[in-house]
Amino acid sequence: MTFTASEATLPQTRHLATAVPGPRSRDLHAERRQQVSSGFGTVLPVFIERAEGGILQDVDGNRFIDFASGIAVTSVGASNARVRERVAAQLERFTHTCFMVTEYESFTQVCRWLNEHTPGTFEKRTALFSTGAEAVENAVKIARAATGRPNVLVFDEAYHGRSLLTMAMTAKENPYRLNFGPLPGEVLRAPSANPLRPSRAFVPGADPAAAALAGVEELLSEHGAGSFAAMVIEPIQGEGGFVVPAPGFLQGLRSLADQHGIVLVIDEIQAGMGRTGTLYASEHEGVAGDITLSAKALAGGLPLSAVTGRADLMDAVHTGGLGGTYAGNPLACEAALAVFEEFEDGTLLANARAIEETVREVLEPLVAQVPAVAEFRGRGAMLALEFADPETLEPRADLAQAASAACHAQGVLTLTCGTYGNVIRLLPPLVIPRDLLLDGLHVLRSAILEAAANS
Ligand code: PMP
């Protein structure tokens, strides 16, 4: 059972009833500024009343095409029928017991599905938490407990969260780390294998994966490979710019991890759960992490995250060493079981691949047509355009921001990302109807052509 536009109760069409933001959103935003910490930013200051399929409807009656999915979360749709039914039934039974106090079966069922479906044929165990950052932090705790080593290796352009440890693992200074130091130690950064912007270690003409791997080896020998508990890598770097690592990079990391007894942690929080057309993005590279992290799309919008890994690692932690009051909340576990059912017949994965085809058809020609469109990249329904000067590769954040703002004004919710803020990324729900996708893509295409012509 996947969503079809004809079953929707919210019309699956873009509609502008007012200017964006409309008067009610403006009033609510003014009130928000009085009540909410200024530390929270907002991509588009409209207040959402309902969301379904590929549409977000605001309090002024505007309907936006959703190219964000709440940052890769609502892949099955923001009001998926199965998720609603399972969560509603659970609401009738109980909302919480705390799994560390008394147990419930849905927690184990979610763990079983993840043990069976994450890459790697070895025996696995799973631990559930609430947020992505918590999953990352717990993976580090587990790797340290299992290896008895302190250091954590991360990469340029990485994003792993905003908590104190994950903020140190995240690469970008502003806004994530600025003013929030001192940062925890034992986090060391190696080059990533960005094909468009090769690493510090890159020698022109060299293979970008090999060059980045040489940088990793250098860091390992500098600090002593035996001091590293974990390497943590995103199979496609999300906030860092939808960077698909050069072919061979993930496999190279797998070999280095094996060679030095380092736990390879694959952070699939943004790229996983079907987003790229396979359940996990690391499958495209034929690589299995010792630990794989899931969150975001795992529970259709309810807060749930998971650390799934080799049984020997996951069981190396002393009893009581992992947990959290809300870890694996029963409403979130039911939502995840609904999401798993949605993935069962393969339609959503096929949708992700079909979305890629459609987006490619409309947007990829811009690389040849518009000099400042430096690259079209990504996989499945995780796709992006990077804007840069064609001669110098100087990032053109101005173009990404202008095109994105024009989309917002016309009812298309786009997001930007990248170390330099010069990337427009697309993360539509996997259930977006094709007509709606095409409408949004044509708005985006025109916005890019116009921004480029005016610059
Ligand atoms: N890792 C990756 C790859 C992410 O994209 C994110 C969220 N953008 C996180 C970790 C952190 O997740 P959360 O915001 O749920 O803590």
Image (cartoon, rainbow, N blue to C red):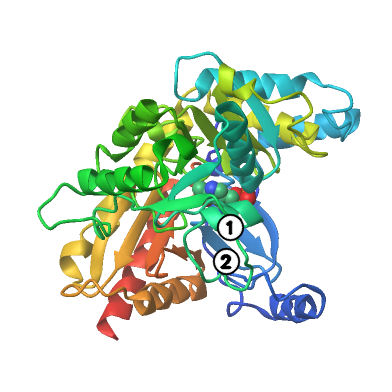
Q: Answer with left or right where residue 123 lies relative to residue 49.
A: left
Q: Is residue 188 above or below residue 375?
A: above
From mark 1 to mark 2, how far is it between C-alphas? Answer: 6 Å
For the N terminus, the image quarter is top right
Q: Is residue 354 above or below residue 321?
A: below
x then y, percent, for residue 42: 62, 70
Mark 2: which secondary structure? loop
Q: Residues within 10 Å of mark 2 (few under 14, many from 20)?
A: many
Q: Is residue 195 visible?
A: yes
Name the kind of residue labelled 1 in the image: Met
Mark 1: which secondary structure? helix
* Residue that protrudes farthest toward the bottom in the picture: 454
As rendered, which of 187 and 86 lies closer to the eye? 187
Residue under label 2: 177
Q: At x 23% / y 65%, what residue is drawn?
A: 374
Q: Is residue 363 above or below residue 114?
A: below
Q: Residues within 10 Å of mark 1 (few under 14, many from 20)?
A: many
Which image quarter: residue 442? bottom left
Residue under label 1: 167
Q: At x 82% / y 28%, what residue is drawn?
A: 99
x then y, percent, for residue 392: 19, 75
As rendered, which of 104 and 366 lies closer to the eye? 104
x then y, percent, for residue 404: 44, 71
x then y, percent, for residue 409: 50, 76
Name the kind of residue labelled 2 in the image: Arg
Q: Answer with left or right where residue 88 lies relative to residue 223.
A: right
For the C terminus, the image quarter is bottom left
Q: At x 34% / y 36%, what residue is drawn?
A: 253
Q: At x 21% / y 63%, what residue is drawn?
A: 367
Verify CB contact (< 8 Å) between mark 1 and mark 2. yes
As rendered, which of 20 and 119 lies closer to the eye? 119
Mark linked to residue 76: none
